[in-house]
Amino acid sequence: MENKLYYQDAYIKTFKAKVVKQAQDSAGNWYVCLDRTAFYPTGGGQPHDIGTLAYQHVINVEEIDGEIRHYLSTPFQDTKKEIAGTIDWERRFDHMQQHAGQHLLSAAFDQLFEYRTVGFHLGAEILTIDLETEVLTVHQVQKAEEMANQIIIENRPIEVKWVTEEELTQYPLRKETKVKDDIRLVIIPEFDYNGCGGTHPNATGEVSSVKVLDWERQKKKVRVQFVCGKRVTKQFQQKQQVLLELTKILNAPEKEMEQAVLRLLESNKTLEKTLERAQENLLQYEAKELLARSNVDDRKLVRVVFQNRTIQELQKLARIITTEDETAMVYFVSQNENRLQVVCARGTSGTGSMKKVVSAALPLINGKGGGNDAFAQGGGDALMSGEQMLQHLVENVY
């Protein structure tokens, strides 16, 4: 472990090393291996470090087959001389805060409610843990969050110990370790004892704070979303900015925001219903107008080419017409930019299969559709004019 400087001291920001290998992986990506490194590779739920090696940007770090690979955009021209490495400290310390905060929150859920953590993900914005329970209440979340933040306030030390498998019996581990050799324990005395290969600060106070954002059931587990450290401040700033903007838009103080939104939603529902009724009335009127000028051999033949009408509107209009007059035959085509949509329908006293009519027409426009003998619809590319499509539909019946 002596070449893994991040295990010797997680606060190392710069170091010097020698290149022991430079190669390309199976995908053609260049990487170098060093005789020692402070770059943490992806592992244990924690993302990799980034930074620079001799002014080259390190874009990824992985441990593969026992070697730590530092991925670069281009290879080094000279691999013989010693190079300087610099860690992106802001990213590293953020990961240290988040990972330690996860230990605190997981331990709190475990101690208070015996909810074991069975999954962990450290993302760019938020963290998640999966708890081995199907139900999680607001009260339980508040109690676990309070306990985690109390341990932060107490500024307890975060210790690291390397132990053997036999020595594990000396510690009340929160969960069984997967590693059997070179076991690394991260310990918060009298609170949490856990096998972990990640980087952590020296004391819980450096985590600053833990805040749960949300949780949801995932199959037979509950996934908890939370943030720690500087991310808590960032989340607060973002939410506060949104809240301030909403107070202006809704013209309501912060404490009355919920009621203002509920009133707005209720008003919107009323307006939607009113608009829906108005649209239904317009379609009813339009249907009567179309029927009034569509007499053919004692039947109503309604054939129209529309511009930019939705297929849902055409379907409603066709149903109104065929309900109003059982002898009606309806052929609608709508031209919407580079698309053609068709709706064909007949009343209960009509004959012929609308499904066959539409099925015969759709291949002409590379279209798809469906329906039955009385009502069918579909759409495709505008490979012909709306009038040409309408003529084709009608000719398939008469």
Image (cartoon, rainbow, N blue to C red):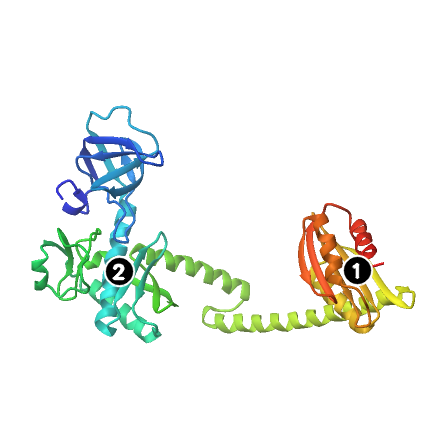
Label 2 amino acid? Gln
* Mark toward the viewer: 2 or 1: 1
Residue 386 screen position, x and y as percent: 78, 51
Q: Dividing the picture into quarters, in which one does residue 51 lie?
A: top left
Residue 324 seen by the camera: yes
**Residue at mark 2:** 102
Residue at disc 2, secondary structure: helix
Residue 327 position, x and y percent, is 84, 70
Query: Residue 72's x, y, as percent?
Result: 32, 34
Could you tell me which secondary element the residue under label 1 belongs to? strand
Q: Does 101 sit left or right of 276 as displayed?
A: left
Residue bearing mark 1: 331
- Considering only vertical position in the picture, is 250 above or below 73? below
From mark 2 to mark 1, how far is it between C-alphas? Answer: 63 Å
* Residue 37 location, quadrant: top left
Question: Where in the figure is residue 69, as x and y percent of width and height?
Answer: 26, 38
Kind of residue sitting beneath label 1: Tyr
Residue located at (28% from left, 24% from top): 77
In the rendered structure, which disc, 2 or 1, sits on the residue that comes first in sequence?
A: 2
